[in-house]
Every structure is written in C-alpha cells, then in structure tokens.
Image (cartoon, helix red, strand yellow):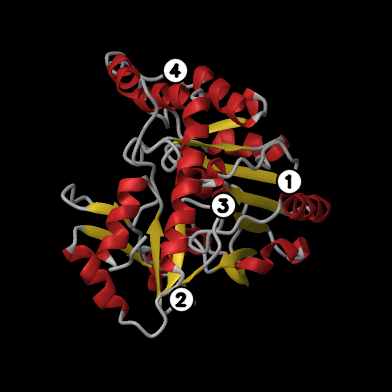
Amino acid sequence: MHPDAVREAERVPHGGSTDRAVLDLSANTNPESPPGTEAAYEAALAEADRYPDDSYREFRAAAAGFLGCRPEQVVPTPGGLAAIRLAIQTTVRPGETVAIPSPSFGEYAREVDLQGGDPVRVPHDDIVATDPADHAMVVVCTPNNPTGECPAREALLALADRCADAGTTLLADEAFLGYTGQDSLAGHEAVVAARSLTKLFGLPGLRAGYAVATGEDREALETARRAWNLGTPAAAVGAHCLRQTQFVESTRETVARERARLREALEPDFDVSPSDAPFVLVDCGDRDVDALLDRAREAGVVLRDARTFRGLDSHVRIAVKDSEATDRVLAALGVTG
C-alpha cells in the first residue's frame, strides 16, 4: 500500500447487522449452510493447536473442482475481499488507472486508492465494453452489486481477450456468480477471479475465499499472500462446502423462486431492477427512504440503504433468502404478495 494514500483514505459503508433479533436483509448471505458444516468445523478445531498446512492442498483441490480449474491456480485468502485486495496490491502502481463499474461495490475504489492508483468509474452496464489499453486493471462484478445484473459470458470473455491483448489484468469479482450457474472466468490468462464462501454458503464470519489466476499473476498472488492466511477451521469448512453441489443447486432454485416472487409483489408500487443475484435493487421514487427503512426496522427487518452507493439517491437493496424472509419483508413494506 502507498503510505500517503492510506492516511487520506476512508472506510466504506456496508450492510450487515449483528442484532440477532432482526431479520437481516441488508447483507446478501445464504440463511443456510451445507449439511455437515458444523461437524467439519468441530473436527478442524481440534487440529487448531498447530499451524495450518500452508499448502492448503485439500482446500485448493475442492475449489478447483468447484470451478473446473487446476488446484495450483487457486490461491487461498481469508475472504473474497482479501482476494480483491491481493489482486490490486500485486498489480496497481501509484498513479495507474483502474476501470471500475459504478455504482458497484465500494471496496474497489478504496483498494485502488490505498495503492495510490486512480479509480476511473464506468457505468456498470458499460464496463464490459471498456477499452483496457490505458488501464492497469479493469474490474467486473458478476453479478453487479447492487444492481444485480450479470453480463453475458460472451461479453466477459471478449473483454478478457482484449485485456490479454493490452497486457491489462481483468479482476472478476465472482462473489455472487455461484447463484447464477454461469461459468467462471477462472483460468483465462488475463483474469484474476475473486471468490468467496460468504454469500453462497452462508459463512460471512468464517472469512474464507480464494483467488484464481494463471502465469505471472498467479505467481505474484501466491508469493504475496500471507503465510497461514486461512485458519485450520476455515480451510476445512471451505473444502467441505465447496463439494456440496446438491446444496448449491437447491440454493439457486430457492433464490430464483423467491426473487421472482419478491419482484412481482413489489413492482406495482416500486421500480425493481432486473437481477441475477441474491438481492434486488428497489427505487423508492419520491418516497421517504429513511421512513421506509425505519418502518421495516420497526417490523424487525433490516434493509440496505443503497444511497451509500455512488449515483443512487432513492434506493434500497433487499436480500433474497427463503420464503419466510420474503413474507416478512413484504409485510414490513405493506405489500401483498
């Protein structure tokens, strides 16, 4: 990181509530984790009196099987954000530009700023058409947070090819891609893919994720990552979860069904953006957003104030979980569905 840039930077607001008495729909996490997760954690905890095996062979093999890449291309990280930071740290020099989607996850710009780089904001629906020639890196979020759309794989591959030709790294944040069934960009020569166990497997507190890259990018990531950067329980639980294909399919079906039900119920009264993600972005129009958030909170439901995303001034983001969550949020908003 650039020392001067760190002193000028600020932290980024996020969703997520620690109050277990409320239904937290401000964070886009699965309310369920795969069967056997608790047992895997307990077994690994018994081994936590020694340092982890820094090779993380089992975790890498499970991640590779999940994505269809090679185990040696997988670089373990303590969460998807750690993979994003590692990719930017090993790529961006002070003064270099990085094309990032907007509105999107606020940590992209923050991490570029911390490196002394210059984030160049591109409309989220135009990011795949970016000319990478003048940038050290291009960032895509698939599906984009908070808008929810996932660019077509053909457009993403075309962007990756242009990045390869320009010598530019394409950072693909695939934190939500597991909800879509679309193939990862992992394995493309120009791509660093960042993945997380937080969202799909409902484990935000475990802090487990990974990056996938090839060639010199992979070597840089592997060299720069901290030793023992996954705890023994995180590595064991991560490997277990990444093998649970039936759980993933069931989750996709549930989220697709509830997302459609939520959108159908809200659309007569609200403008709801199309979404491939486990959340929907809702434009409240001329309604008082603070009053709407307060009303939901009084009913025990926490929504994400999406006005914290650049360019959004009348929006909330609602996580899609299970049928009970859909019922509760619709009731909290006074919507019949």
| Number of the label disc, if any, that sits on residue 88 | 3
- Which residue is found at the position 65% from the left and 43% from the top? 182
Q: Secondary structure at mark 1?
A: loop
Mark closest to the chain's N terminus, 2 or 4? 4
Left or right relative to 50: residue 92: right
| Labels 2 and 3: the sequence-earlier one | 3
Say which of marks 1 and 3 sits in front. Answer: 1
In-front residue for pair 334/282? 334
Image vertical order of residue 121 relative to residue 36, above or below: below
Q: Nearer the viewer, residue 55 or 1?
A: 55
Nearest to N terminus: mark 3 or mark 4: 4
Residue underneath mark 2: 312
The picture places residue 237, in percent across and down from the top left corner, at 39, 24
Q: Residues within 10 Å of mark 1 (few under 14, many from 20)?
A: many
Q: For marks 2 and 4, give the CA distance.
A: 45 Å
For image coordinates 41% across by 30% down, the residue present is 230
Number of residues whose C-alpha sits closer than 10 Å to that of mark 2, classed few (under 14), some (14–19) or many (20 or more): some
Q: Amino acid at mark 3?
A: Ile
Residue 29 lies in quadrant? top left
- Foreground residue, 230 or 16? 16
Query: Which of the 4 image quadrants contains residue 192?
Result: top right
Q: Amino acid at mark 1?
A: Ala
Q: Which residue is mark 1?
A: 190
- Whether residues under marks 2 and 3 lie with C-beta atoms below 8 angstroms apart, the answer is no
- Where is residue 313? Give x, y as percent: 42, 79
Label located before the other in sequence (2 or 1)? 1
Is residue 265 visible to us here?
Answer: yes
Q: Mark 2 falls on what kind of element?
A: loop
**Residue 67 coordinates in the image, percent (x, y):** 62, 32
- Mark 4, residues whose alpha carbon is within 10 Å: few (<14), some, or many (≥20)? some
